[in-house]
Image (cartoon, helix red, strand yellow):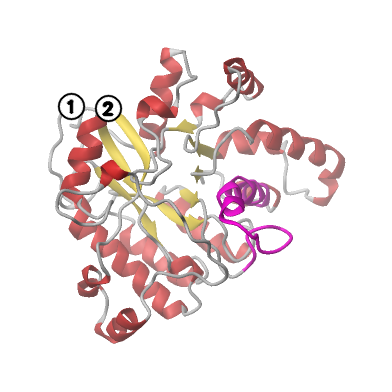
Amino acid sequence: MTAVTEAPGRPKPDTQVGIVDCDTHNTWNDLSELRPFVAERWHRLLDEFGPGHYAGGGYPRFWGDAADTAPDSGRKSGSDVAFMGRNHLDRYGIAYCVLIPSNPVTGMQNLDFAAALARAINDWQAAEWLDREPRMRSSIAVPTEDPDAAVAEIRRLGDDRRFVQVQFSGRPREPMGRRRYWPIYEACAELDLPVMSHAFGSCGNPITGTGWASYYIEDHVGPAISVQANITSLIMEGVFERFPTLRFVSVENGFAWAPALRWRMDNAWTLLRHEVPHVRRPPSEYFDEHVYLATQPVEEPEKREYFGQMLDQYPGFVDRLLFSSDYPHWDGDTPARAVPLLRDKDARDKVLRQNARRLYRLP
């Protein structure tokens, strides 16, 4: 595998493609690293409050990052670009990884501060990560609850194709199909940038449909429920009819629920389609054309044949499934671990390489 240094802009087609990891988490070692990228007016607020908390309840994670992801430098896991290159990209033959940074801005109530931090996170990524490691691509952090500011940030970075998608939290303030978010989708469609929803986060609303959960285990299981609600909203509100080229990426939400969701939406639409005349086709068709799913966390049924049966229930599954490691988190997966039950060589190649290359326009 070879890599070349490239200037900002569309990647050049002279990198041999190996595995593509669609969920690699980078972070700062401490907040001082963001300071050079934040306007001076925000320095005191950054020092006093920091960006580390979202509105609403949070649950302590009793397990941290994987032990073997701690850098030799003594920095936090996920904060050392050179170590990540050796420990993750070199180690597993990863030609490209898509960074999903620590992004607290989606849950912030101070929208001006959120916009300033989003810009800082993106500039920090470009300078400290993308400029230093040509195998890395990244997600654009945006203040999703301030669509005008989010669109401005998307358009500011839209020509730098090292940024390959726009990042939402798993639980925005409203269901993702609501029209308040449509300006973001319009900008993404114009610039050919997928919208990515990553598990967890909150914007002040409870993380379940009936209130706040008691335990972290409930929060840990919950993302699969949240993303199904958001996909249903995107389809039923007519987002994919309005923006037919828009692509949606679900990351760290699992994927075994997809066949059942497709069935349920189609059955409901058959009976209630008069309520949503803008949904012109069965919902499963929109799902199959617009939704991509990342592998982590991989569902591992008790019997191997159950996994194959799930794939049979959704024939296009392997064309929409992306390898994701969730590096450096404790429950992450290696490439071998991510698709252990995919026995077909061509299917494995699609999941580990081809699907992400097509989605993100990688050479």
- Residue at point 35%, 71% (across, down): 117
For the residue pair 155 and 146, the one nearer the viewer reads as 146
Rendering coords of residue 257 (x, y %)? 64, 36
Looking at the image, residue 145 lies above or below residue 159:
below
Image label count: 2
Residue labelled with disc 1: 1
Mark 1 residue type: Met
- Residue at point 52%, 69% (across, down): 145
Rendering coords of residue 358 (x, y %)? 39, 32
Give the quarter of the image for residue 122: bottom left
For the residue pair 196 and 260, the one nearer the viewer reads as 260
Magenta-span inclusion, residue 320: no
Rendering coords of residue 329 (x, y %)? 38, 46
Mark 2 residue type: Gly
Q: Do the residues labelled 2 and 1 touch (CB within 8 Å)?
A: yes
Quarter of the C terminus within the rendering: top left
Quarter of the N terminus within the rendering: top left
- Which residues, given as a range, are shown in magenta? 205-233
- Residue at point 50%, 69% (across, down): 107
Left or right of 240 in this view: 106: left
Looking at the image, residue 173 lies above or below residue 355:
below
Circle 2: is it few (<14), some (14-19), or many (20+) Cα within 10 Å? some
Mark 2 vs mark 1: which is more N-terminal?
Answer: 1
Give the quarter of the image for residue 28: bottom left
For the residue pair 81 and 350, the one nearer the viewer reads as 81
Residue 222 in sight here: yes
Looking at the image, residue 140 lies above or below residue 314:
below
Element assignment for label 1: loop
| Identity of the residue furthest to the right in this view | 271
Real-space Cα distance between discs 2 and 1?
A: 7 Å
Residue labelled with disc 2: 18
